[in-house]
Amino acid sequence: MNKQLVGKCLLTAMIATGTGTVALADDDDGKKYSFAVIGDMPYNPTASGVQVYPAPDYERVIADINGSNQGRRDDDDNGRPSFTVHIGDIKGGSTRCDNNVYTQNKTYFNSYRNPVIFTPGDNEWTDCHRANNGSYDPIERLSFLRSTFFSNNQSLGQRKRTLMKQAGYPENSIWIEGPVVFVTLHQPGSNNNRNRTTGLFLDLTDAEYTARNAANMAWLNQAFALAASNRNIKGVAIFSQANPFERFLEPGQGYTTTGYADFITNLRTKAQTSGKRVVYFGGDTHYMRIDQPMTGTYPACVTVNPCVAAAVPSSPTDRVNNFTRIEVFAQNDVHWIKVEVDEDEPGLFKFIPRRVPGNN
């Protein structure tokens, strides 16, 4: 079945469920292509707690992605990435959340030749209440972020891509290319903005988290429903800023419950029952890795009220083998990950860390 017919079937499914429309890529048959994933950048340079621009290391990343397949020996015939996903944290965690940070990063996103899809991190809103972030109201910063980056159903970048957007949460997107359904979930670090009991602008009832988490779970369900609606879809790729594994319950922050339990439970079930290749792209802990951390019992709470997180199994016998986690390069490690998609390969995805000349 060709890509247009696959797209027609999926589009019919979306209209039937009242979720909107999405456009497929139009440059090839979608069987073999690549995309780029970045996040937790640009963090530097800074001066007196303020982000400073230009950011030379990040600009070299953009130039490298824009010029991909131009003489690099580790490239192949997949060419320049079809699109780039930034998984959040467009500034450092100890710098101010001033308006120019958002507008400058939008300018950077629009300097990419191909589409850019962005999902927010904690540094650009949940943590803005901190004194060294400017003591901003996080909800006001979230509103400004949405108006800056998510005002319509188009991606960022010089070449736009039409995205399916979630009502009320325009930062949540779904799109399809070839054999893969892609989905962004607004799920940041700092415990997903749950259970924060100190500092300014408290939300002691977790009202913001509760509503957004419910929306995220519905959106994740929608992505897997689309994948299930056609046998030609072989994989689901999920993008969020959080690391819900090593920070399932972040130590030393006073959290008594985790903001990622619903996501992990839902993700585990979907991975185990979907029959698809499932990939999660995240960041937050600033350690590039490609692994398979999920088991039938990890991560999880072994006790509740308060939660005590399960330890990583040393020799898991119940690993979820069709699930892979990728954490992006971050902070001072300013590079990118190229992901090749080939529906004729059993693994569907191939992950290639790309180190940028001139960066450390």
Image (cartoon, rainbow, N blue to C red):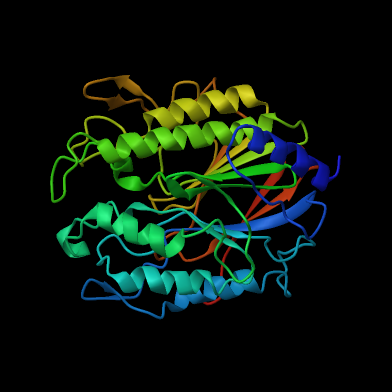
Image x and y of residue 40, in percent? 42, 59
**Along the line of sight, which residue is nearer the eye, 100 or 344?**
100
Image x and y of residue 102, in percent? 37, 68
Q: Quadrant of residue 243?
A: top left
Q: Residue furthest right?
A: 1
Vertical arrangement, residue 195 with respect to residue 82, above or below: above
Image x and y of residue 345, in percent? 78, 42
Q: Quadrant of the N terminus?
A: top right
Q: Does 360 sit left or right of 306 as displayed? A: right
Q: How many marks?
A: 0
Image x and y of residue 303, in percent? 28, 18
Vertical arrangement, residue 115 with respect to residue 288, above or below: below
Q: Does 73 sit left or right of 249 as displayed? A: right
In percent of the image, x 44 and y 32: which residue is there? 263
**Along the line of sight, which residue is nearer the eye, 317 or 8?**
8
In percent of the image, x 68 and y 34: which residue is there? 13
Vertical arrangement, residue 1 with respect to residue 313, above or below: below
Vertical arrangement, residue 32 with respect to residue 264, above or below: below
Evaluate whether residue 41 shows in this view.
yes
